[in-house]
Amino acid sequence: MLQSVNGLHNFKLHAEDGEIGAIRDLYFDDARWIVRYLVTATGDWLSGRQVLISPASVTGVDWGARSVAVSLTCDQARNSPDTAANQPVSRQHEADLAAFYGWPPYWAMSPFGMEPMVMPAPWQEALQQARADRGPRDPHLRSAREVKGYRMEARDGSIGHVSDLVFDDETWAIAFLVVNAGSWLHARWVLLKPEWMEAISWEERHVTAGVTRAFIEKSPKFLPAFPLSPEYTQQLLKHYRGME
């Protein structure tokens, strides 16, 4: 089901034997547009540490109870490799997390889902290679909280700013960027596909989409109420087929 990233904020993360903390952010891959980690604030029991949890550990999302269940224990969260808050995440650190939890390293996986690839490398080889990489950070790992507020440009002019992301709570793939176009289209929000993004400037905080303002203006009217109805999604996809 398609859901709002904003709506996931402050959901409680429940381990097999207790509560770990609350979700504060999501880190996503801006090359494949898929969520890689849930960023969890642990509170007093771990002195306010930040813990990264892979969607591979998620066993269920209860939107009514505002909670996410994971197949981990509190001890595993307590003893996980330390992640500094508000610091870039290095590939070496991701390799340490994957080895500690037994997660498949996503950079050695198929872009179409959570199933591991036979190529280009077995899991252990992929982890060893990542640990040997001395690059300062993963260049494609981005904060969902950070991208909110980025200016959105069409091919022929500004259309507004990013206000949210929409993701599939089964695959954790990002389906749409939510753009607040109120400064251009009165009281309007629009949904744009990630694959239409032609350029993202993280330094200048703006995104360029490969669509025109006229195409966006004709898109079905959207109000940011989630979950998205199947009827609206079908209407939206019918409009989007004009871009394919």
Image (cartoon, grey):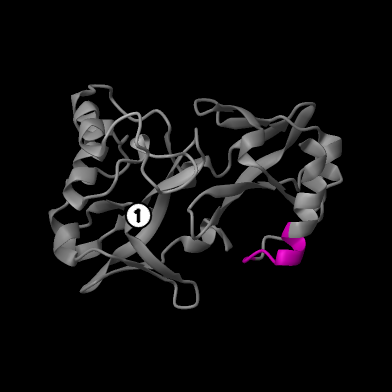
Say which residue appears at 23% left-offset and 26% top-offset: 129
SS class of the residue under badge 1? helix
Q: Which residue is mark 1?
A: 56
Could you classify mark 1 by the number of other residues whose Cα lies within 10 Å: few (under 14), some (14-19), or many (20 or more)? some
Image vertical order of residue 91 relative to residue 80, above or below? above
Res. 46 visible in picture: yes
Camera-side residue of 128 and 73 = 128
Res. 188 visible in picture: no
Residue 152: x percent and y percent? 67, 35
Horizontally, residue 176 falls left or right of residue 92, namely right
Residue 120: x percent and y percent? 34, 28
Horizontally, residue 35 falls left or right of residue 86, namely right
Say which residue appears at 33% left-offset and 52% top-offset: 54
Horizontally, residue 244 falls left or right of residue 140, namely right
Which image quarter holds the N terminus?
bottom right
Q: Kindly identify the amino acid type of the residue bearing the numbered disc 1.
A: Ala
Q: In the rendered picture of this protein, how many numbered marks are placed on residues?
A: 1
User: Is residue 231 found inside the magenta-colored segment of the image?
Assistant: yes
- The magenta span reads 226-233
Residue 147: x percent and y percent? 52, 41
User: Is residue 49 found inside the magenta-colored segment of the image?
Assistant: no
Q: Residue furthest top?
A: 134
Say which residue appears at 58% left-offset and 51% top-offset: 164
Image vertical order of residue 156 relative to residue 174, above or below? above
Horizontally, residue 129 falls left or right of residue 150, namely left
Image vertical order of residue 150 relative to residue 35, above or below? above
Image vertical order of residue 128 relative to residue 52, above or below? above
Residue 243: x percent and y percent? 78, 37
Camera-side residue of 112 and 235 = 112
Q: Quadrant of residue 104?
A: top left
